[in-house]
Image (tube, helix red, strand yellow):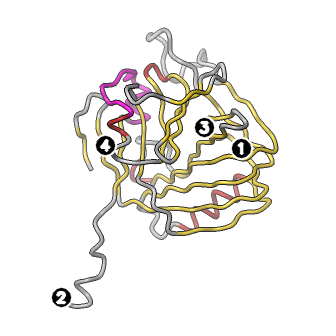
Amino acid sequence: MSAKDSVDTFPARYLYQVGTYHTLANGQYDSHITLEALLRHGNYGFGTLPNADGEMVILNGAAWHINTEKEMTPLTLDCTLPYALVGQFFPHRMRSLRQINARDTYKKFTRLIPNEAKFSMALIRGTFSYVRVSIQPVITDRRLHFYSQERQHVEYEKRHITGDMVLLFTPMAYHGLHPTGTMAYFHSERAHIQGKVIDFKIETATLTMDVFDGVTLTTPYGDALYS
């Protein structure tokens, strides 16, 4: 094998996703895919429960859920997920962060991405001056549209806390799977806060990141769409 032939021979790595923002918004609130099945494909990620109930965050293979009553609990492996994403996270870049806001953190993250046509995931672990998150409410009336103004998301903020933040960068070509660009989810068991990130400021933390070649997508009923 020549030197040229040996270049880029690493196997492709993919995120694994159940459903999309689009399927969720169009009323696909049930699922046959369990957390146990999801975790076979990755150890970090996020999602929601049936009927778009609250926010789920997965950290190092452990899944946590929070609802709009701010009740945060570990999830059992038999729970089902209409929308979720995981990646087998192997960090290969690390940066120290200090006294930096959300906007500048996202900029620093995207500058580290070697190819913006690929998905990238990052984990930020450290101390935050504040974190503000949003939690989506469970849909109790299925006639209510996902984006209805009657669905009041709960927002709350905590200050001077330690925790973990999972970031995902989605390329423009994959619009519809998630919002393109960077989105983030936060979890702190000690501070009892979790949710989709609205804003934050870091006191001191470490950012590690990984890059994925694409995504394997399945419907909530287990039918593969593409990879």
Residue in the image at 70% along x and 59% along y: 205
Image: 40 above or below 106: above
Left or right of 168 on screen, residue 10: left
> Of helix, strand and loop, which one carries label 1?
strand
Sequence-wise first label, 3 or 2: 2
Sequence-wise first label, 4 or 2: 2
Tell me where residue 11 appears, x and y as whole percent: 28, 66
Q: Which residues are magenta?
A: 20-35
Circle 4 residue: 217
Residue in the image at 63% along x and 21% along y: 68
Q: Residue 199: which disc?
A: 1
Report, in whole angstroms, how far the alpha carbon at label 3 lies from the one at label 4. Answer: 21 Å
Circle 3 residue: 196
Residue 105 occupies quadrant: bottom right
Q: Are marks 1 and 3 in contact (CB under 8 Å)?
A: no
Of circles 4 and 2, the one toward us is 2
